[in-house]
Amino acid sequence: MPSPTSNENESPDEESDPASSEDVFKILITTDNHLGFAERDDERANDSLIAFEECLQIARDENVDFILLGGDLFHDNKPSNHVLLECINLLRKYCLGDKTIGFKLISDEKINFSSTVQLNPFPWANFKDPNLNVSTPVFSIHGNHDDPAGSTPLCPLDLLNSCGLVNYFGNLSSLENIDIHPLLFRKGETNLAIYGLGSIRDERLHRIFLKNQINLLRPTNNPDDWFNIFVIHQNRVAHGPKNYIPEQFLHEFLDIVIWGHEHDCRITPEFNTVQKFFVIQPGSTVATSLSEGEQLQKHAGILHVYKKTFKMHRRPLQTVRQFYFLDIQLTDHIDEKALKTLSNSKLEQKLDKILTDTINELLLRAQNEHSGHPKQPKKPLIRLRVDYTGFDLFDSFNDIRFVQKFSDQVANPKTMINLHKKRESNVFKANEIKLDPDAIKISNEQFHQAQRVEDSIQAYFESASETNRLRLLDEKSMLAALTEFIDKDEVYALSTMVEAQIEQSQKFLSSNIHNDDVAALEDELKRFKALQNVDDEEAIKRRKDLLVIARQERIKAYGDKSSDDEIMVTQSIGISNDNSDDDDDGDDDFGQSSMRSTQKRTQPSSSSTVRGATRGRGRGRAKTTPAKAPRGKKKPF
């Protein structure tokens, strides 16, 4: 297992490494560039392009072998002509040239670069194309922002791939029994395998992992001699039972996981003590949300790989717009005595002064911390999250008028102030149904064993006392609807089942109750539920008929689109690569027959190395194990 080091400012060329440069891969890593973000904002329109150009400049200055992108190169699936043109210009400027490629790509390129929707006329890496002079190849997966979409699923990377500017990999031909074929590189004595998986909806990918349907194909020729990198673009932070990908789902033979989608820059490798691999989270190169994690220093990374060891060098980006996020608790600035004695106008003046002084301090800090790079914007982003709980008079505070005085100094004056109050805690009523703690314990144990929410719910109702069960809806029908919703995304399954049971109960009661006796009504409700909550042929048929109705409702509303149409690609088709280089050795021809399947057996775990935290849209910070090298492992080269 490799062991990392990280040097922020030291140039690798100045180090005395025992490894020859002819054996060391040098890779620039960046993710979530979001080209085109805030394109219509006159102040911030070019921020993403400027930061991406700096990444390309670093790659050229560092003389890297290639660039590896972790998804969301573009902010939209259909970027504007201007953004697409600027991206093409940058790639042509920094990635084309006469530099000799110092490594070999020896995997089956017909599979690695198969087209998503049609026969790919160029099923090979761009640096092998005789009509192109590529100095720095770019390899990229797609993210959730620039994923394939439409009736013929295409994404911007398909266009760049066809233009010969980007090598697009990690797109899938099916969401059933996924086989991931690696890109296999060789440079001197170093063998490098890069696995890529483009973004898939987290809940669906979570289920695919649980079903053990993802296979990472490894070379049969000395598989342990390969350094294995996995590039993924998914939620790393848990937002729900299935709305993320736990690190323990990933295969143990991996050496590094490059994690895209999360915008917090955590470029220093973090060691997973369970799976025994390192996770590198480069983060975004542009702030797309005014969340706390986005204010961390943005970086690109230079990864050095030699045999089974690696080094990670951080390169702070000098052209990124500065961003300052600050929480303000008004109770720390205005005491209770002032609240009672000062008039409303005086209190508002005091609030105005607090905010003004804070912003001026941040503006001065931004001026002092400016990198001095001519392309770094002068106006910073500022976000003040002001908690005014207990100060009801500030409900009328005109924050829009307040920020006008900073419109020429801040890049985001309209979104600079966020006034909010804490929600009042709910008080449970005495007559509300309480959960059964013993049943919850049994349910939790079942959840850790099965890892399916519906199984856990079923265990709860089977163990709960009568007073803690549903009074009208029968559990078996609701579990059937819940399973249909989770496994097949039938969005009308639950509502259809509830409406049908309410209608059936009304008919049952109207035909059996002929007076106003409440006790009799309760008894009949229990009898109705007992008749429904069975597993005989009639009940099973009734539930199936209702689920068919739910499916028809979904088709009527959304059309007959399969739940697996999110990424539709054709099967890989063998194509003769007449334009590939002829200087590859015969034993380097790694085709499909020379790969073996490595299937991940996902075991439920009572804890994860990554836990959730509050964050902005699709972004976040997570706690992981420290990025310390394990004892007894090889030292870096």
Image (cartoon, helix red, strand yellow):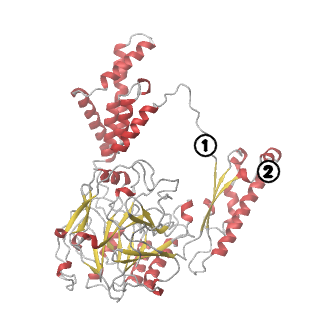
Pick the residue in front: 58 or 600: 600
Disc 2 from disc 1: Cα separation: 26 Å
Give residue 141's position: percent from left, percent from top.
35, 67
Query: According to the image, label 2 marks what residue?
Result: 345
For residue 262, side relative to residue 232 (left or right): right
> What's the residue type where badge 2 is placed?
Ser
Q: Residue 29 appears in which quarter of the rendering?
A: bottom left
**Quadrant including the C terminus:** bottom left
Q: Nearer the viewer, residue 316 or 486?
A: 316
Residue 414 location, quadrant: bottom right
Is residue 240 visible in the rendered image? The answer is yes
Q: Amino acid at mark 1?
A: Arg
Q: How crowded is the residue under tag 1: few (<14 C-alpha within 10 Å), some, or many (20+)?
A: few
Q: Which residue is mark 1?
A: 423
Does residue 556 appear to the left or right of 297 in the view shown? Answer: left
Percent position (x, y) of residue 318? 55, 77
Write down the quadrant of residue 158 in the picture: bottom left
Label 2: state its secondary structure: helix
Residue 445 sits above or below residue 198 on the image = above
Is residue 166 left or right of 355 when viewed as pictured? left
Q: Is residue 45 above or below residue 17?
A: above
